[in-house]
Amino acid sequence: MMTIGTPLMWALFASFVLAALLVDFFAMSKQGAHKVSIKEAALWSLVWVAVSFVFVGWLWWYLGGLEGNALADTKALEFVTGYLVEKALAVDNIFVFLMVFTYFAVPAEFQKRVLMIGILGALALRAVMILIGAWLIAQFHWVLYLFGAFLVFTGVKMWWAAGQEPDLEANPALAWMRRRMKIAPDYDGEKFFTVVDGVKMATPLFVVIVLIGIVDIVFAVDSIPAIFAITTDPFIVLTSNVFAILGLRAMYFLLAGMHERFHLLSYGLAIVLGFIGAKMLLVDIYKIPVAWSLAFTVVVLAATMWLSLRIPSKGRPGGAYPFRAKQAEPSPRSAPLRRP
C-alpha cells in the first residue's frame, strides 16, 4: 500500500508520541490524585490541539519541499479531515466514559489515572487495528465495501439509539465480572486489588478499567473504517488517530459537564458516519473529494451543536445519568455495586 511514511518520519512520529506520553505521565505523577479543574482541562486541550496542527503544518512543509505542493496539500487535508472525524467520535466516547464513572461513583481524583490507562490501551489497539486494516485493504479491495456497509449500518444504529439512556446494568461484561470475581465494596485509593477480611478482591476501579477497555474496542471498530474512507495511507490514518486520542483525557474533563448541552451530537455523528460509509461504497464509481468530506463533516457537526444549544434536552433535569453505585454491606463475599 502506498504511503508517504518513510522510516525517518515513522521514527520521528514514534519519538514524539513517546515524549508526549512521558510528559503527560510526569505531570500526572507530580500532581498526584486530584480533581482536574475546567481551567486545567481547557489549557491541556488547547495544547494538544495546537500540537496537532503544528504537526500537520510541519508535514505540509516537509512534503512540499520533498514532493511538491500538490501532494502536501492533499495529505494535509486528509490529516485534518481524519483528525476532525476521530475527534468528533471521541466526544461520543467521552460521554460513555462519563456514564461509566457516574454509575460506579468514581471519585473525581481517581478518574485521571483511569483515563490515562484507557488512552494507552486505545493507542496500542488503534495501531494494531490500523495495520491490520491497511493490510486487508491492500490485499482485498472488496474490504472497502464491507467497511462502507458497516459504517452505514453503524450510522443508522446510532441515529435510532440517540437520545436513549444506555443501561449499563444490562452490560454482559459487567454481569460476567460479577459472577467470576469478588469485588470489594469500597475503593482503596487508586489500587486495582485489595484485601478485605483476609480475602483478595478486585476494587471497583479495576472493574471500571475493564469496562473502559471494552468501550475503547467498540469505538475503535467504528472509527477505524471511518478514517480509511478518507485515506488509505497508513501514516495519515495512524497519525490522525493518535493525535485525536492524545488529547482525550483533557477533553473529557472539559466536556464532562456539558453532555446535555450537546444532546443532539449523536444525530450529527450518525449522519457523518452514514456519509462516510456511502463514500466508501461509491469509491469505484465516484470518488468524493476529501475537501467535500471535510466541509460536510464541519457543517453537520456545527449544525447539530448549534441546534443542541437552541433546542432544550428532553432528558433528566441536570442531565444526570440514573446510575449510581450502591453502598454495599461490609461483607467480603458481597457483590457490590449491584442495583437493588
Image: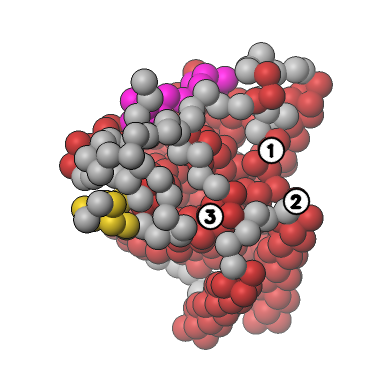
Is residue 92 in sight in this rendering?
Answer: no
Q: Residue drawn at (53%, 81%), measured in percent from left and top? A: 15
Q: Real-space Cα distance between discs 2 and 3? A: 16 Å
**Residue 102 coordinates in the image, percent (x, y):** 53, 36
Occupied quadrant, residue 330: top left
Quadrant in the rendering for residue 218:
top left
The residue at which mark 3 appears reads as 110
Precedes in sequence: disc 1 or disc 2: 2
Compared with 177, 11 (above or below) is below
Q: Residue at x 55, y 47 (%)?
A: 107
In this rendering, would 180 be left or right of 215? Answer: left
Dot 2, how many residues are within 10 Å of its Cα: few (below 14), some (14-19), or many (20+)?
A: some
Kindly identify which residue carries mark 1.
257
What range of the chain is rendered magenta?
161-171
Residue at image point 59% right, 67% down: 32
- Label 1 sits on what residue type? Gly
- SS of the residue at dot 3? helix
Question: Which of the image's four quarters has the C terminus?
Answer: top left
Residue with the mark numbered 2: 38
Image quarter hosting the N terminus: bottom left
Which one is earlier in the sequence, the residue at label 2 or at label 3? Answer: 2
The answer to whether the residues at label 1 and label 2 have Cβ atoms under 8 Å apart is yes
- Magenta span includes 191: no
Q: Residues within 10 Å of mark 3 (few under 14, many from 20)?
A: many
From the viewer's perspective, is 295 left or right of 175? right
Q: Nearer the viewer, residue 137 or 97?
A: 97
Q: Nearer the viewer, mark 2 or mark 3?
A: 3
Residue 173 coordinates in the image, percent (x, y): 29, 38
Magenta-drawn stretch, dominant element (helix, strand or loop): loop
